[in-house]
């Protein structure tokens, strides 16, 4: 057998094993092997694919890392419209729903329902052909959605290939529908990262999921903690299922994650019972739900009931009441971030909002305070937006006594006293003092934190302790710490001090992307740091790279470029970096396997003559970036590049609905 064939077989075995284990881990939450063992298998797959790139298939788990940025989203027409649901707000509405159904069916028989948690995320449709995930889209206007295939591919709980059934055959075409969401935990971590990076926070997990799915660069999506629950199909008629309960089991057997809190309910009273159950459970769930969806279980009855213009007659959404409460706004604190941004935080009289005691709420910025016309002492209506970050909806003006006081934004930094600045085009007030102790401490916390150098045991509290006692004032100081230094502080013992120093030393060996991100340069987050590593490669080169060269890098905007150039140009920073190298900092590049090939998964076809370079140069560039080049048109082609005087391939391409791009767009894509 040829080497290629052996590799192909080995790859198939690896892919099957990996998808089985990924399903056990991400979908069933019941892994069979350790994370380490999984990583080993994955590394093996990557090594083999690197050796035989021609064997990379779209269902390979390596393809989840995200491909190349898109210029905009294409659209996808849904074969069957994606409908929405009518709402029920109380038990009475639900009884009315049942009555309508019985009237319509002219039957007094009790109906069996299927009641599912209503996930608060984003509806998407996934299309599988011959068991392979080929396309995915948003709901859009119900008829046409946006093509977000490459972004959906990055979600681990979406199978790239359906699991083969023992004796049942995989449907030739399967269009499943479900909800993409972000868990509370994932949301908190994402916002923490954004706060560290000086970026705007997402208001709730739903917005975070929507923002992540609508990224033009799937590499960004790949870093977001997105998850997926399936809840239906576009057309159940050809599937071996008679009702929604069976459909859930069937979809699970194909490798999808179905919500375990969905229940068949043989009567509307059982539905109401389940509603109470879910409503009580809601605050303890790891993800957001905003109600319960009640569906007539039988597909036969669903078909008979049919749909109205926008919603089916066989389903309804029983919404939970919003988690709101009123309380008093006691005072406003001003928090100083790593980049000097001042965020007003409302201190509230503690109050129970949907089962959680809330005593603080973010006010975002000065404009928000003015827009909402908030005053100290106001009675305020608050809500847990997406039930996570509490926010003030509005003051209750009717309750004002006249003793309420205006909220005055500070003119000087509450920590260092420096005059605060607000740029004309920015909503944020900032402390411009780079030596402001509050900023310095935040920067140090970021450096040692999870998304920074990840120094175990050096979280917020410990860093504040080291900073406040004067042991560390900047990053190099961290590496001067000794075990004795730590032992002098309260809370440290022999073992913990020993481990602490070890953890610090361990962080000396790192990769460039992690290090850059840890430095906490304004407008530089994880993705930009990775781009810098890819393009600049060494710290020495970073110190001399010009702002213009940085703007040339696709994905780095002018703001980031200016900020990066400024940072590495400052003598103080240069000295600190040189000092770190002296102290033993060793920076390598990430393993090549960690880097995604920007054009993997993309097949280009050229027609017409190109003006800026030769056809062979264009082809070799595509291959360099992991893409493929086709000579004839087929559905496998992802981009048709049209030069001057194109042939009639373009007509065929249009018929097939392929992406047709100009030479200019191509240049943009491959960064000539
Ligand atoms: S069924 C025709 N089931 O709620 C029935 N929807 O307006 C289509 N949703 O946008 C929806 N959880 O994104 C269904 N278990 C669930 C759901 C669910 C959340 C969302 C869905 C849709 C909206 C209904």
Image (cartoon, rainbow, N blue to C red):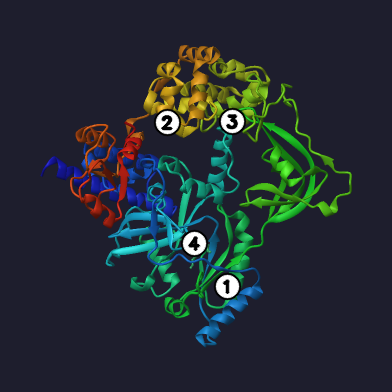
Outermost front residue: 645
Question: Which label sits on residue 530?
Answer: 2
Task: From the image, tell me which residue sits under label 1.
Answer: 271
Label 4 and label 2: CA atoms lie apart by: 38 Å
Which residue sits at x=51%, y=22%?
504
Task: From the image, tell me which residue sits under label 3.
Answer: 459
Task: From the image, tell me which residue sits under label 4.
Answer: 260
Which residue sits at x=44%, y=40%?
220
Question: Which label sits on residue 633?
Answer: none
Q: First in sequence, mark 2 or 3: give its number.
A: 3
| 545 relative position to 320: left or right | left
Label 3 and label 4: CA atoms lie apart by: 35 Å
- Foreground residue among 157 and 306: 306
Q: Quadrant of the N terminus?
A: top left
Label 4 and label 1: CA atoms lie apart by: 16 Å
**Residue 490 in sight from this viewpoint:** no
Q: Secondary structure at mark 1?
A: helix
Label 3 and label 1: CA atoms lie apart by: 46 Å
| 147 relative position to 466: left or right | left
Q: Position of residue 174 (x, y in %)?
A: 34, 63
Label 3: how many Cα within 10 Å (few below 14, some 14–19, many 20+): some
Q: Nearer the viewer, mark 4 or mark 2?
A: 2
């Amino acid at each position: 057998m040829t080497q290629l064939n052996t590799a192909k077989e080995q790859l198939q075995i690896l892919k099957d094993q990996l998808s089985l284990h990924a399903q056990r881990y991400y979908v069933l939450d019941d892994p069979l092997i350790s994370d380490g063992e999984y990583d080993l298998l994955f590394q093996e797959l990557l090594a083999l694919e690197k050796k035989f790139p021609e064997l990379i298939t779209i269902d390979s788990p390596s393809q989840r890392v995200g491909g190349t940025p898109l210029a905009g989203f294409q659209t996808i027409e849904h074969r069957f419209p994606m409908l929405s649901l009518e709402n029920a707000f109380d038990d009475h509405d639900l009884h009315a729903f049942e009555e309508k159904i019985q009237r319509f069916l002219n039957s007094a028989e009790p109906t069996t329902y299927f009641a599912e948690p209503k996930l608060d995320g984003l509806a998407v449709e996934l299309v599988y052909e011959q068991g392979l995930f080929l396309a995915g889209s948003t709901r859009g206007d119900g008829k046409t959605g946006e093509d977000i295939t490459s972004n959906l591919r990055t979600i681990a709980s979406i199978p790239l290939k359906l699991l083969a059934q023992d004796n049942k055959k995989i449907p030739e075409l399967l269009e499943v529908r479900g909800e993409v969401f972000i868990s509370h935990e994932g949301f908190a971590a994402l916002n923490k990262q954004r706060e560290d990076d000086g970026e705007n926070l997402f208001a709730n997990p739903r917005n975070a999921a929507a923002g992540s799915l609508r990224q033009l660069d799937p590499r960004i999506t790949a870093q977001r903690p997105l998850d997926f629950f399936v809840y239906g199909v576009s057309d159940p008629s050809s599937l071996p299922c008679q009702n929604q309960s069976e459909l859930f089991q069937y979809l699970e057997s194909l490798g999808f994650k179905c919500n375990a809190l969905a229940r068949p309910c043989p009567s509307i009273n059982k539905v109401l019972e389940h509603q109470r159950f879910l409503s009580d459970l809601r605050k303890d769930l790891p993800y957001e739900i905003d109600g319960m969806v009640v569906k007539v279980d039988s597909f036969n009855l669903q078909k008979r009931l049919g749909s109205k213009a926008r919603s089916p007659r066989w389903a309804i959404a029983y919404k939970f009441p919003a988690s709101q409460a009123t309380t008093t706004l006691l005072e406003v604190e001003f928090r100083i971030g790593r980049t000097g941004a001042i965020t007003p935080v409302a201190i509230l009289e503690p109050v129970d909002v949907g089962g959680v005691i809330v005593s603080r709420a973010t006010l975002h910025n000065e404009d928000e305070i003015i827009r909402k016309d908030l005053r100290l002492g106001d009675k305020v209506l608050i809500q847990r937006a997406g039930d996570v970050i509490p926010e003030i909806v509005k003051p209750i003006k009717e309750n004002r006594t006249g003793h309420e006081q205006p909220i005055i934004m500070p003119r000087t930094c509450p920590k260092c006293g420096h005059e605060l600045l607000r740029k004309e085009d920015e909503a944020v007030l900032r402390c411009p003092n780079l030596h402001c102790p509050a900023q310095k401490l935040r920067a140090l916390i970021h450096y040692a934190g999870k998304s920074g150098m990840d120094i175990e045991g050096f979280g917020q509290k410990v860093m504040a302790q080291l900073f406040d006692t004067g042991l560390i004032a900047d990053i190099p100081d961290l590496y001067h710490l000794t075990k004795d230094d730590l032992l002098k502080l309260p809370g440290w013992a022999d073992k913990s001090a020993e481990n602490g120093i070890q953890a610090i030393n361990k962080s000396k060996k790192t990769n460039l992307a992690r290090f850059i991100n840890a430095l906490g340069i304004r407008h530089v987050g994880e993705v930009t740091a990775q781009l810098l590593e890819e393009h600049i490669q060494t710290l020495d080169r970073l110190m001399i790279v010009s702002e213009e060269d940085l703007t040339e890098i696709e994905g780095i905007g002018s703001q980031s470029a200016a900020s990066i150039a400024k940072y590495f140009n400052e003598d103080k920073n240069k000295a600190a970096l040189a000092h770190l190298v002296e102290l033993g900092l060793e920076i390598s590049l990430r393993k090549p396997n960690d880097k995604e090939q920007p054009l993997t998964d993309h097949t280009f076809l050229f027609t017409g003559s190109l003006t800026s370079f030769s056809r062979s140069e264009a082809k070799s560039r595509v291959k360099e970036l992991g893409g493929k080049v086709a000579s004839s048109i087929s559905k496998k082609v992802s981009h048709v590049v049209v030069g001057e005087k194109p042939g009639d391939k373009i007509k065929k391409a249009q018929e097939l609905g392929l992406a047709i791009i100009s030479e200019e767009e191509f240049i943009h894509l491959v960064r000539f």
